Amino acid sequence: MRAAELLDNEYSGHFGTYIKEAGDGILIEELEISLHEFIRFVQDIPMDKFDYRYAEGKWTIKEIIQHVIDTERIFAYRALRFSRNDKTSLPGFEENDYADNTDSNKRSIQDLLTEFSAVRHSNLLFYKSLSEEQLKRIGTASNNPISARALGFVIIGHAKHHQKVFKERYL
């Protein structure tokens, strides 16, 4: 299943930005490929950049990596709920509150990448377990409709978005 195959009713709002960022590869393959691309990309960042902020109040690269991990967990949880036909509308989340309540800057980059890998591998297994029917189920998150399969592309696109941010503002 490719992002281009998503129907118009499967997502709206800000989710579309991340879906476009994901590209048009096959969902399961892109979840795997983007895992390795993200890790390789981060491993090539100079060590002195991980605690760098390009402006006052902006996150460090370590904080952004933690944000990517936290956000992937939230998106996967939403996909789990919707794939199981849970019709409960799920609220948004305040990303700055999450960032303010981590110790990511005290962690090693290897520890953060190990956690990212574990989360992504768990989500790969989850997505591989879903039937076509389960993937197409739609719920509401952040006041916008979104399907379980669209959330998979959002996961991919969100990490790619932050790789671009690293390139444009940190490196």
Image (cartoon, rainbow, N blue to C red):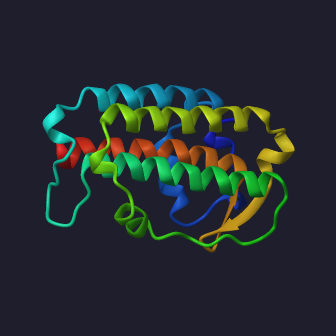
* Direction from residue 33 to residue 131 in the image, left or right: right
Residue shown at 79% from the left, 51% from the top: 83
Task: Say which quarter of the image contains residue 140.
Answer: bottom right
Please indicate, yes or no, whether residue 7 appears anywhere in the rendered image. Answer: no
Please tell me which residue is depicted at 14% across the width and 61% down the height of the picture: 55
- Quarter of the N terminus within the rendering: top right
Please state the horizontal and vertical placement of residue 155, each as a whole percent of the image: 54, 46
Determine whether 22 is above or below 73 in the image: above
In the image, residue 3 sits, relative to residue 14, either above or below, namely above
User: Where residue 32 sits: x, y (%)?
Assistant: 56, 27
Considering depth in this image, is 29 or 44 the residue closer to the camera?
A: 44
Q: Position of residue 20 (x, y in %)?
A: 50, 47
Q: Is residue 8 left or right of residue 94?
A: right
Residue 163 in view, yes or no: yes
Q: Position of residue 37 (x, y in %)?
A: 41, 27
Q: Residue at x 86, y 45 (%)?
A: 133
Res. 91 image quadrant: bottom right
Query: For this rendering, which residue is in front, 51 or 171?
Result: 51
Answer above or below: position of 98 versus 159: below
Q: Residue drawn at (64%, 59%), measured in percent from left and top?
A: 11
Q: Tell me the quarter of the picture where residue 103 sits.
A: bottom left
Residue toward you, 102 or 9: 102
Q: Count of labels shown?
A: 0
| Side of 45 where 10 appears, left or right | right
Locate the C terminus by quadrant: top left
Left or right, 155 with reference to 76: left
